[in-house]
Image (spheres, rainbow, N blue to C red):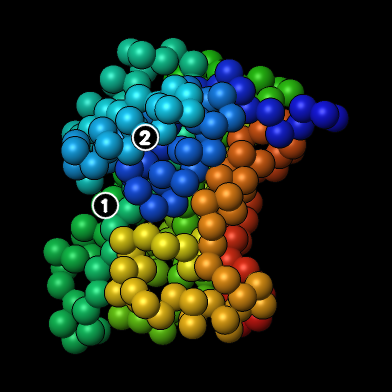
């Protein structure tokens, strides 16, 4: 019982791990003894984040472009070569696009769907050999998909593709969670609310004002993101699969 949340000695991959929620989760893993691979498109930003996190533990940066299946396959092949057994995969890489419903372009829709949904499915598919190798009945391997409260409630923003993609992520999580649990791979999702990130940059200067309306009246913190991911990666959640955990200070509950 004293070690329910111990994740030390595990190996993790965090996509979109150079900033935002991905970097928060990666920091939590690294600080708790997880060998953590982070990936993103921008090499300089990725290396800077890895260098900072490496002061607390083991963090390896591998640049990739997961917006195409070819990019997914190249990255997965590199991970499989390095890590025959992978305990944790965090599918966090994502994009958004905003435009009025009359002007919303197909290119924006496809960009969001390809990265937010397609890449999750195919990266998980390609890393299944390593995930299966790491999972046991007592402590399965874990896939954590990052969804959004925008996939549950109306965002009241013009981010149509993003909202649809995150609802798809939640349903994909339920489907894969039930199916892969029989192979000792648990799949769950986190649906974050308001966290500081590139996607909330348009709210700059107004975040605290917006957060005052939440039942827990603040923005999400690195500890909130990391703690939730650690729970979903540890023995404490070994009997949880196909679940979407809302992490939003009570916003959805009050909606």
Residue 27, percent across and down?
48, 38
74, above or below 96, in the image: above
Q: What secondary structure is found at the residue carrying circle 2?
A: helix
76, above or below 81, in the image: below
Q: What secondary structure is found at the residue carrying circle 1?
A: helix
The quarter of the picture where the C terminus appears is bottom right
Residue for badge 1: 114
Residue 207, percent across and down?
44, 75
Residue drawn at (41%, 33%), measured in percent from left and top?
A: 53
Q: Is residue 7 visible?
A: yes
Return the disc, 1 or 2, that comes first in the chain's sequence.
2
Residue drawn at (40%, 27%), measured in percent from left and top?
A: 54
Hey, which quadrant is residue 201 in on the image?
bottom left
Label 1: few (<14), some (14–19) or many (≥20) C-alpha neighbours in 10 Å: some
Left or right side of 149 for 93: left
Residue 200, percent across and down?
36, 68
Of 141 and 228, the residue lying toward us: 228
159, above or below 131, in the image: below
The numbered disc on residue 52 is 2
Hey, which quadrant is residue 70 in on the image?
top left
Label 2: few (<14), some (14–19) or many (≥20) C-alpha neighbours in 10 Å: few
Residue 55, percent across and down?
43, 27
Q: CA distance from mark 1 to mark 2?
A: 30 Å
């Amino acid at each position: 019982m004293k070690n329910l949340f111990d994740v030390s000695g595990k190996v993790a991959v965090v996509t979109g791990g150079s900033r935002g929620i991905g970097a928060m989760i990666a920091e939590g893993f690294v600080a708790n003894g997880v060998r953590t691979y982070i990936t993103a498109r921008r090499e300089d930003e990725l290396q800077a984040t890895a260098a900072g996190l490496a002061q607390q533990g083991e963090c390896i940066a591998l640049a990739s472009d997961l917006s195409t299946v070819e990019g997914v396959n190249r990255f997965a092949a590199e991970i499989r070569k390095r890590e025959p057994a992978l305990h944790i995969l965090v599918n966090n890489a994502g994009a958004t696009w905003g435009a009025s419903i009359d002007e919303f372009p197909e290119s924006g829709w496809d960009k969001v769907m390809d990265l937010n949904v397609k890449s999750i499915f195919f990266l998980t598919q390609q890393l299944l050999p390593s995930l299966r190798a790491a999972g046991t009945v007592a402590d399965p391997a874990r896939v954590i998909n990052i969804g959004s409260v925008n996939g549950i409630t109306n965002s009241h923003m013009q981010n149509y593709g993003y909202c649809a993609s995150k609802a798809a992520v939640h349903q994909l999580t339920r489907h894969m969670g039930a199916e892969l649990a029989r192979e000792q791979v648990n799949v769950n999702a986190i649906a974050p609310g308001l966290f500081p990130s590139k996607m909330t940059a348009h709210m700059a200067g107004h975040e605290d004002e917006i957060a005052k309306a939440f039942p827990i009246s603040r923005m999400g913190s690195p500890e909130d993101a990391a703690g939730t991911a650690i729970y979903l990666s540890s023995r404490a959640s070994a009997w949880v699969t196909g679940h979407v955990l809302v992490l939003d200070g009570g916003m959805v509950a009050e909606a």
